[in-house]
Image (cartoon, helix red, strand yellow):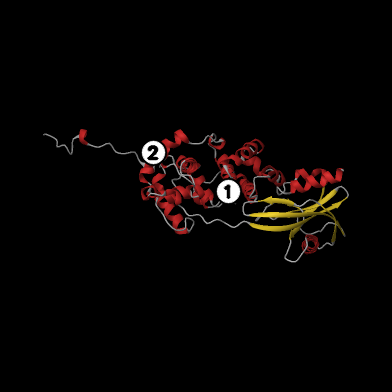
Amino acid sequence: MIKSAATSPKAKTRKSPALSTLLLRWYRRRGRELPWRRRSDPYSALVSEAMLQQTTVSAVIPYYERWMRVFPDVKTLAEADRDHVMKMWEGLGYYSRAVSLHKAAGMIAHKRQGRFPENEDHWRKLPGVGAYTAAALAAIVSGQRVVAIDGLARRVLFRFLGMTGNAQNARAVSKMREEGLILIAAKRPGDSVQAIMDLATAVCTKNNPRCDECPVSRACAALAAGDPGRLPAIKRKKIESIEVAVGLWVRGETVYMQRRPDKGLFAGLWELPGGKVEKGETPEQALVREFQEELHRRVRPVLSLSVVRHSYTSFKVRIHPFVVRGVGQAPKSGDGHFIPLDKIGDYAQPAANKKIWRDFFQRKGS
């Protein structure tokens, strides 16, 4: 029997590789060499993902390497003193991540008897693990075929799928999670998730994307439409400027400091008492009021230190530091006490405090 051209093996067209395969091929050639990728254990993945939240890779690398030397496994971290943990995180920012990571290590080491979560839902139950981190860890550690949506993946998928509108609303994220699976290889979901991140960093950049280098450009809806660089539209946040007054309540060779709550700005760090300068107040008046409201202590500013200017992600601050004299002993309520001045460096504090202490000790020594 003579075979027709339509059924002849020679006449069959070769099937084009799947998009997930093309992406993985690109990742093997172009993927970044990162220290946590050289390890394949759940603990290193958990630490790196916690550190990478809202922080650049270049900033994280030295912190990660130092962290792993000091806390090489989940048991060591779980049993570490919290002040030591916070000191090792000092300078990395978003300090609630360190608090949550420490708590998560305790949960894994003790409550789960050293067993790490097996899927996305279980990862979500750990302190500080949100939707993106749970999905990333489920893919990288647990081998679950899911799409992890952070700012980088959102940009790639928003363009790839040709989406419009708000890239951050729940409906948009749901579509990315569902339709973005076309880029996630069933057998290597962790590599696929990391490949999307690297693609966003090296090729699908915020400005001037290099579409000619993209392994999945043939299926990119934004490229087909002709202007991928305009997506997604980003609304810039206004940077707030605030004035703050803080007091160095010095008593002999000690100074009073207090620990911030475990949640919110500068979570778990040690700070100098004080607060925001309200409209119509001088910094001195604000400081006296804050001490009265927070610590129920009357203080008197006796020395004005240099004003400190510092910028954070969402606000800029001008800090007015004063050495104060207080009436009475240390407050019995709250998480604070007098600390020896020669031990100040042992306590994790907001970055701006370094400038305050530098000026204080220079004046003290002169």
- Residue that appears at 27% across and 36% down: 14
Any mark on residue 22, and which?
A: 2
Which amino acid lies under the numbered mark 1 shown in the image of this protein?
Answer: Gln
Q: Mark 1 points at which residue?
A: 54
Asked whether, in this view, residue 207 is left or right of residue 112, the answer is left
Percent x, y of residue 149? 49, 50
Give percent across and percent down for residue 252: 88, 49
Side of 264 where 140 appears, left or right: left
Residue 70 image point, x, y percent? 67, 37
Q: Is mark 2 on a helix, strand or loop?
A: helix
Dot 2 amino acid type: Leu
Residue count near mark 1 (Cα–Cα under 10 Å), binned few <14, some 14–19, many ≥20: few
Q: Residue at x 18, y 38 (%)?
A: 7
Q: Which element is circle 1 on?
A: loop
Number of dots carrying numbers: 2
Task: Tell me where residue 316 appears, x and y as whole percent.
Answer: 66, 54
Residue at the spot x=74%, y=54% of the render?
319
Q: In which quarter of the image is residue 247?
A: bottom right
Image quarter of the C terminus: top right
Mark 2 is surrounded, within 10 Å at the Cα level, by few (under 14), some (14 to 19) or many (20 or more) other residues, namely some
Which mark sits nearer the N-terminus, 1 or 2?
2
- Which quadrant does the N terminus fall into? top left
